[in-house]
Amino acid sequence: MRDEFGHQITEKIATGSGPCRVSLKPFKKGIDKRMLLTHSPFEMDNAYNQPGPIFIHSEEVEEYADIFRFPPEIKADKESFPLTLIGYNKEQQMTISLLVGDDDVDELITEIFDSCPDVEYLHARNAQACCFICKIERINSADAL
């Protein structure tokens, strides 16, 4: 069991909340078994291609499906999930990076997209562990209906 970078995939009982990169739900510490692997969420290889750790459930889980809403369990737990939003342009160059802190992540996403027309998409990452959580893309209002 090796990841796309050739690193050994490890499997252990969760010691942290995660989240699971597939379900985008927190792990139950001391209960859930999770796998740790290296992942890069980028399509192009360049200096901003930030491979890093992600966790996924060892058991099969349902993929996060509410794609027009930031994962509510992550949003609600600012202590376990301190967030950074990082914006990238079409060339996959980083254009903005903001700590969410006490701000509302949904409002901050809207503010970034409204004020930074060059931002094509955002990555949400854990601000402490740097784990990739999810990609947030611009949408047309008709797409969200």
Image (cartoon, grey):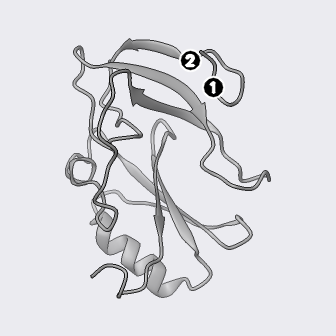
Q: Are marks 1 and 2 in contact (CB under 8 Å)?
A: yes
Picture quadrant where residue 68 is located: bottom left
Classed neighbour count for the residue bearing mark 2: other residues with Cα under 10 Å, few (<14), some (14–19), many (≥20): some
Relative depth, front residue between 84 and 60? 60
> In this rendering, would 97 be left or right of 12?
right
Which residue is located at x 24 percent, y 14 percent? 30
Which residue is located at x 38 percent, y 21 percent? 58
Position of residue 145 relative to residue 108, above or below, is below
Position of residue 5 relative to residue 33, above or below, is below
Classed neighbour count for the residue bearing mark 1: other residues with Cα under 10 Å, few (<14), some (14–19), many (≥20): few
Picture quadrant where residue 8 is located: top right
> In this rendering, would 45 be left or right of 43?
right
Quadrant (top left/top right/bottom left/bottom right) for the C terminus: bottom left
Identify which amino acid the numbered label 1 is placed on: Asp
Residue beneath disc 1: 3
Relative depth, front residue between 106 and 71? 71
Which label was assigned to residue 34? none
Q: Going from the N terminus, do you reach mark 1 or mark 2 first? A: 1
Quadrant (top left/top right/bottom left/bottom right) for the N terminus: top right
Which residue is located at x 44 percent, y 30 percent? 55
Q: CA distance from mark 1 to mark 2?
A: 6 Å
Residue beneath disc 2: 9
Identify which amino acid the numbered label 2 is placed on: Ile
Picture quadrant where residue 61 is located: top left
- Residue 40 at x, y = what percent? 63, 43
The residue tagged with tag 1: helix, strand or loop?
loop
Position of residue 127 relative to residue 72, above or below, is above
> In this rendering, would 94 be left or right of 134?
right
- Residue 137 at x, y = what percent? 48, 69
The residue tagged with tag 2: helix, strand or loop?
loop
- Residue 65 at x, y = what percent? 30, 55
